[in-house]
Amino acid sequence: MIPLPVPAREPQHNDEMSAVFFRELGIPEPDYNLGVGSGPHGWQTGQMLMRIEEVLLAQKPD
């Protein structure tokens, strides 16, 4: 079985810009906002990986 995607996002700029993107493309808001924020690229990548892991552990996708 192919698992369904777990909607998550990490806004690059700000919440209003993200809201416009989702609204104009007719995409539903994701279930999770990783909320990493600004920082060096390596730090951001590490934070995203840790927070994605939390989502995956909670959702237990196939």
Image (cartoon, rainbow, N blue to C red):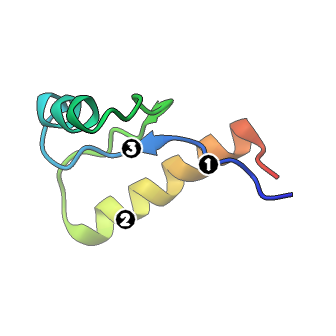
For badge 2, the amino acid type reads: Thr
**Residue indicated by mark 3:** 9
Which is in the foreground here, disc 1 or disc 2?
Answer: 1
- Front-lying residue, 39 or 30: 30
Q: Residue at x 62, y 48 (%)?
A: 5
Circle 3: residue type: Arg
Q: Residue at x 38, y 44 (%)?
A: 9
User: Marks 3 and 2: which is nearer the front?
Assistant: 3
For residue 36, above or below residue 44: above
Residue at which label 2 appears: 45
Query: Does dot 3 land on a helix, a strand or a loop?
Result: strand
Which residue, as the protein is rendered here, is positioned at the far right? 1
- Image height of 61 relative to 26, above or below: below
The reply, left or right, for residue 59 in relation to residue 52 is right
Disc 1 and disc 3: Cα gap in Å? 12 Å
The label nearer to you, 1 versus 3, is: 1
State the residue position of label 1.
5
Q: Residue at x 41, y 63 (%)?
A: 46
In three-dimensional space, the C-alpha distance between marks 3 and 2, rounded to whole angstroms, equals 13 Å
Mark closest to the chain's N terminus, 3 or 2: 3
- x and y percent of residue 58 in the render? 70, 36
Q: For the point 76% across and 47% down, which residue is it?
A: 61
Q: Quadrant of residue 11?
A: top left
Dot 2: element: helix
Marks 1 and 2 close (CB-CB < 8 Å): no
Element marked by disc 1: loop
Residue 10, how many percent across, how many down? 33, 46
Q: Quadrant of residue 13?
A: top left
Q: Position of residue 35 (x, y in %)?
A: 33, 38
Label 3–label 2 contact, CB within 8 A: no
